[in-house]
Amino acid sequence: MAGNSSAGTGSGRSRGFGGIPGWGLVAGAGALATAAGAGVIGWREHWLARNAPATPPELLTLGDATWSGTVASDDGIDLCVVERGFQTSPVTIVFTHGYCQRKDSWCLLSHQFRKSFGDDARLLFWDQRGHGDSGDPEADDCTIGDTADDLAAIIRERVPGGRIFLVGHSMGGMTVMSFARRHPELMDRVSGVALLSTASAGLTKGGIPQMMLGPVGQALTKTAQSLPQLANQVRQLASIGEMPFIRGASFGDQRTPYAIVRLNEQMIDDTSATTILSFFGALQLHDESEGVAALEGTPGVVISGDKDRMIPYERAVDIIEAWPGARLVRAPGAGHMVQLEQPKLVGEAIETLVRENWPV
């Protein structure tokens, strides 16, 4: 573990693409059709963004860190961690970001919670493997089980005592569910869990993933896995066809500030080809129904935007039905990046969970 290193906001990864070989009319036609739909969504999103209030630049970062460094995963990958607050705090809130994102996706909540909790709660943010400033895994090591074990490694090293609250967005929520199933010994210290814009299973039942995880997406993933040297070319084809949907479908009907839209786009664009395509394959198989079952007895809140095109609101309802006692919070008009669209609503829901279950 290397401590006290400065944590940047980008990955700095090279993403040179090269030319795209002729891989067949089916993949090409599917990609172009997807791009056409994404263009409509993206145009509307940018129009709303440019007519939204501005966001002060200082709110687009996590803020001053009290500690930053890396924690080694069980398989030797350096995981970037940033903390605000101190280990002496009785509570640590651990934030796990989503697919093609990084820790900066929590920037608005970071400032909101520092104002609300001060030094009473430590905030811990980390980049999942292959994302942000964390190290790159091999393609076979991009699974939700791997990220769950990474979360466990971070908690063991950086949160050896005190009570814990887990917050996960999208793929980060899947990581948290898998963590609950795989690491019951650490769940004994978890006082509450917040799941945002995520699903326990059923990613192919509706929304953009239903299209992305279809034949074209599967063909792209299999090509990249069988021919790793072509990963960047595959990513370029995906960027033409499927990645615009991730960018363009991130937000709902809100007037999200343009700086927030650009931050989201930059996080997506900074994600490496291996990460995108390898985790994409893992998402095709995602089923953490047992992970939700492992949350039984743990206080929780599930938050979802009712305009989420990536993971529809119905998937949040599925989680609630399998998690007795958890509370469902609907964010009207919000899309997939709910914590960036409606930080006040999301922050208040998480803060309520923390305060209601504060250790005595």
Image (cartoon, rainbow, N blue to C red):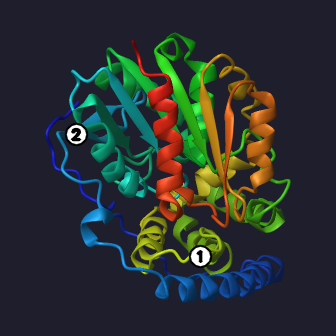
Circle on res. 193:
none
Local secondary structure at mark 1: helix
Image: 211 above or below 48: above
**Residue type, numbered disc 2:** Gly
Q: Residues within 10 Å of mark 2 (few under 14, many from 20)?
A: some
**Residue found 77% across the figure and 59% down from its top:** 213
Residue 212: give x, y in percent of width and height.
Answer: 74, 64
- In the rendered image, the residue lying farthest to the left is 4
**Residue found 61% across the figure and 89% down from its top:** 43
The residue lying toward the viewer, choosing from 303 and 39, is 303
The answer to whether any part of residue 261 appears in the image is yes
**Residue type, numbered disc 1:** Ser
The answer to whether any part of residue 104 appears in the image is no
Residue 356: give x, y in percent of width and height.
Answer: 50, 26
Residue 47: give x, y in percent of width and height.
Answer: 56, 89
Quarter of the image holding residue 108?
bottom left
Image: 232 above or below 342: below
Q: Earlier in the sequence, mark 2 or mark 1?
A: 2
Circle on res. 69:
2
Disc 1 designates what residue?
239
Would residue 130 be found to the left or right of residue 121 on screen?
A: right
